[in-house]
Amino acid sequence: MKNVTIALDEALLREVRQIASDRSTSLNALIREFLLELSERESKAVQARKRIVELCRASQAEIGTGSWTRDDLYER
């Protein structure tokens, strides 16, 4: 594993140390877990976007040649 140095405001550092303590973990483990979850979410989002593009390309749907006037669309 690589070490990373971050700069935090003292008040924030106190707060997150307390959160880590309340969860019976270390600040290091808390940050590692957060970054892992962030990475997993991003990866899933990328895969979802790729799948949407695949589905769009494979779609047989046709839109047609509809042309409407504003009055047609807002007919009451």
Image (cartoon, rainbow, N blue to C red):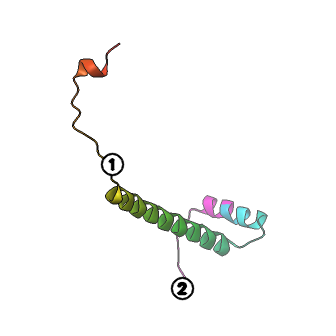
Asked if residue 10 lies left or right of residue 44, the reply is right
Q: Looking at the rendered structure, which numbered label has been put on residue 61? A: 1
Q: Indicate the quadrant containing the C terminus: top left, top right, bottom left or bottom right.
A: top left
Alpha carbon distance from label 2 to label 1: 50 Å
Q: Nearer the viewer, residue 57 or 28?
A: 57
**Residue type at the position of mark 2:** Lys
In x, y percent, where is residue 13? 63, 64
**Relative height, residue 19 to residue 26 (above, below):** above
**Of helix, strand and loop, which one carries label 2?**
loop
Q: Quadrant of residue 30?
A: bottom right
Residue sitting at the far top: 76
Name the residue that disc number 2 marks: 2
**Residue type at the position of mark 1:** Ala
Asked if residue 36 lies left or right of residue 42, the reply is right
Query: What are the residue bounds of the magenta stretch?
Result: 3-15
Q: Nearer the viewer, residue 50 or 10?
A: 50
